[in-house]
Image (cartoon, rainbow, N blue to C red):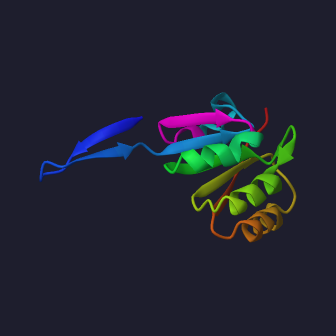
Amino acid sequence: MVKTFVHPTGAHSVLHEPVTLLVGLTRRELPVSVQNRVSSRVEELPFAFIHAVLARAADTREIVSPLFAEGFDATDLAYELDRADYTGSYLVVAPTIPQPDMVLRELREICPNVSVEFVVKMTH
């Protein structure tokens, strides 16, 4: 969504609403805690489109993906985020796993300029 802002001096500027990119999952698959924190503008895309979207979406605030998805995993996406010079947040939705700190540390080493977090998705 694009909003026009009129500065007190009368100058006009365009404000882009921050976007959250969902890679390899849909909004319905997000844990409730994540649904409540993502921006109101959410775009779903396949892993293969990440570079094209980041090149055109400078207003990307956050990227969310599962730890494992069909065709890629979180380490694959972390490498691509680093290659694309992305500096926002990366939220990994994961099942309960042994040693999550080790996996989180590895992801942070792969893309050191990205704020990486884990959210555990409870299975029913």
Above-or-below relation of 48 to 105: above
Is residue 41 rendered magenta in the image?
yes
Number of marks drawn:
0
Image check: 89 left or right of 108?
left
Is residue 12 rendered magenta in the image?
no
The location of residue 71, given as percent across then percent down, is 87, 40
Question: Where is the C terminus found, in terms of image quarters?
Answer: top right
In the rendered image, which quarter is residue 1 located in? top left
Above-or-below relation of 37 to 30: below
Which stretch appears magenta? 34-46
Q: Residue at x 51, y 51 (%)?
A: 58
The location of residue 5, given as percent across then percent down, is 25, 44
Q: Residue at x 49, y 42 (%)?
A: 39
Q: Residue at x 82, y 54 (%)?
A: 76
Image check: 89 left or right of 75?
left
Work out which residue is located at the far top of the displayed protein and give it. 28
Which sits in the foreground, 44 or 107? 44
Q: Is residue 92 visible?
A: yes
The location of residue 14, given as percent across then percent down, is 32, 44
The location of residue 30, given as percent across then percent down, is 66, 36
Which sits in the foreground, 108 or 31? 108
Which sits in the foreground, 102 or 52? 52
